[in-house]
Amino acid sequence: MQQESNNGLLQAGTHDAPEDSVIASLAHVEHDVEDLVAALALLGVKRCSRCRQFFRSTDPGALFDAGPLVCYTCIPDWWSSLSTQIGVADRERIEGKLAPWLRKHHGAEVVKVSPGNVRDATTSEFQIAVKCVECAGSGKLMEDERCRFCNGFGTVRIVMPK
């Protein structure tokens, strides 16, 4: 048997109707928030997929686009998580975009890898080893000459100083 409560809702013997009302209200609010996020995107504001913060898309150094958008602050955790889950080809493709983005927009430095030259990890905020662009990771230039950009190792380190 259904009864009408003080707020005008029909209720059965259980409390399903108020719960349904709360769920419907929550769904409506969620839809409104999605519409608001879409409107912000139309105005040139985009969101980091990790921390969910908003950034102006007119700032090219704010978000890195590797499929999902990732802000600079989230890059170290995002990269350490993602790089272990993807294949070598995908990792190299993303590194090929990430390294120049970090250099251009955030002052990252290219450091040659050499046996006696190990940079202290505590002096850098973030660092990754990437395939040398100059020799395509072979370590050799023309006529089998050792690549001077990576010292013949085929990789360089991209280091973000603190």
Image: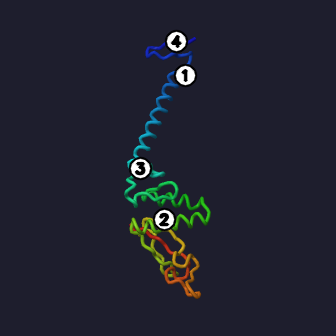
Q: Report the amino acid beneath label 1.
A: Asp
User: Which mark is nearer the camera, 1 or 2?
Assistant: 2
* Res 98 label: 2
Residue in the picture at 48% in, 80% down: 117
Disc 4 element: strand
Q: Could you give the CA–CA distance between mark 3 and mark 2, rounded to whole angstroms?
A: 20 Å
Residue contact at pointers 1 and 3, CB within 8 angstroms: no
Q: Report the amino acid beneath label 2.
A: Leu
Disc 1 element: helix
Q: Quadrant where the C terminus lies?
A: bottom left
Disc 2 element: helix
* Res 53 label: 3
Residue bearing mark 1: 16
Disc 3 element: loop
Residue bearing mark 4: 3
Q: Report the amino acid beneath label 4.
A: Gln
Q: Dot 2: few (<14), some (14–19), or many (≥20) neighbours within 10 Å?
A: many
Rendering quarter of residue 92: bottom right
User: Which mark is nearer the camera, 1 or 3?
Assistant: 3
Quick one: label 4 or label 2, which is nearer the N terminus?
4
Residue 13, image x, y percentages: 56, 15
Quick one: label 1 or label 2, which is nearer the N terminus?
1
* Res 138 label: none
Residue contact at pointers 1 and 2, CB within 8 angstroms: no
Residue in the picture at 37% in, 53% down: 56
Quick one: label 1 or label 4, which is nearer the N terminus?
4
Residue contact at pointers 4 and 3, CB within 8 angstroms: no
Residue 161, image x, y percentages: 40, 69
Coloring applied to the structure: rainbow
* Front residue of this view, candidates 3 and 97: 97
Q: Dot 3: few (<14), some (14–19), or many (≥20) neighbours within 10 Å?
A: few
